[in-house]
C-alpha cells in the first residue's frame, strides 16, 4: 500500500500555484506512485474527485456551502472550476458565501501531490472549516490511495 505523507511545510513552488493571498488554511498531501507523469494533472484531479464520491460532494456542497457547477463540463472537475493549469499541475477553485477554496494537483515523476488552500471570507468560516479540516486530513490518505488504485486500473484496462 503506497505511503501518503502530509507535509507540514508547503514548498513555495506549490504555494505559488494558488492565487489566494494570505490563505487561512493550507495543507499538502503527497503519495508515491510509479507512472504519475504518464497521466495529465486533469486526469488525476478527475480521478480524485470521483474517489471522493458522494461523501466529498456532501462536504463540499452542503457543509462548506461551495457553489459547484451541477452539469458535467470540460471546464469543471466535479463541479470545481478549472481556474488555471500547467504541464504538471492544475488548480480548481470554488467559493461559498463565507469561504474560498483552491485545490492544486501536481504530478511529478513518481509522485502525486494535492494541496488545499482555504481563505476565510467571513468570520463564520473560522468556526466551520477547522472541524471540517480535521476530517479532511483524516480522509486524504485514503482518498489518494483510492485515486492511485483507480488510475492503475484505468491504465491496465487501457482507458
Image (spheres, rainbow, N blue to C red):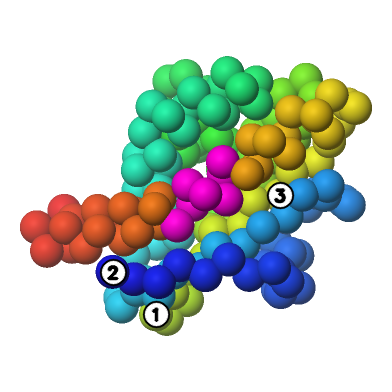
Let me know if residue 49 appears in the view.
yes
Alpha carbon separation for disc pair 3 and 2: 27 Å
Q: In the image, what residue occupies the spot 80% across and 29% down?
A: 127
Tell me the tag on residue 110: 1
Tell me the tag on residue 158: none
- Please say whether residue 97 is one of the residues in the magenta stretch: no
2 or 1: tag closer to the N-terminus: 2
Q: Secondary structure at mark 1?
A: loop
- Please say whether residue 136 is one of the residues in the magenta stretch: yes
Left or right of 99: which side holds 48? Answer: left
Question: Quadrant where the N terminus lies?
Answer: bottom left
Which stretch is magenta?
135-141
Q: Is residue 151 above or below residue 77?
A: below
Residue 148 position in % (x across, y down): 31, 61
Q: In the image, what residue occupies the spot 84% across and 24% down?
A: 124
Q: Secondary structure at mark 2?
A: loop
Residue 70 position in % (x across, y down): 47, 19
Tell me the tag on residue 117: 3
| Contact check, label 3 and label 2, Cβ < 8 Å | no
Q: Is residue 63 above or below residue 6?
A: above
Label 2 sits on residue: 1
Q: Nearer the viewer, mark 2 or mark 1?
A: 2
Q: Secondary structure at mark 3?
A: strand
Local packing at callout 3 (Cα closer than 10 Å; few below 14, some 14-19, many 20+) is many
Alpha carbon separation for disc pair 3 and 1: 23 Å
Q: In the image, what residue occupies the spot 39% across and 62% down?
A: 40
Amino acid at each position: 500500500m503506497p505511503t501518503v505523507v502530509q507535509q507540514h511545510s508547503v514548498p513555495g513552488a506549490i504555494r505559488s500555484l494558488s492565487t489566494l493571498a494570505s490563505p487561512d488554511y493550507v495543507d499538502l498531501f503527497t503519495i508515491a506512485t510509479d507512472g504519475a507523469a504518464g497521466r495529465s494533472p486533469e486526469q488525476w484531479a478527475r480521478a480524485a474527485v470521483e474517489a471522493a464520491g458522494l461523501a466529498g460532494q456532501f462536504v463540499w456542497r452542503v457543509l462548506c456551502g461551495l457553489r459547484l457547477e451541477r452539469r458535467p463540463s470540460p471546464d469543471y472537475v466535479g463541479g470545481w472550476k478549472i481556474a488555471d493549469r500547467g504541464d504538471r499541475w492544475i488548480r480548481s477553485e470554488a467559493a461559498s458565501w463565507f469561504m474560498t477554496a483552491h485545490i492544486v494537483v501536481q504530478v511529478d515523476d513518481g509522485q502525486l501531490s494535492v494541496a488545499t488552500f482555504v481563505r476565510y471570507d467571513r468570520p463564520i468560516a473560522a468556526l466551520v472549516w477547522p472541524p471540517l479540516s480535521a476530517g479532511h486530513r483524516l480522509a486524504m490518505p485514503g482518498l489518494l490511495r483510492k485515486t492511485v488504485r483507480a488510475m492503475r486500473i484505468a491504465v491496465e484496462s487501457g482507458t
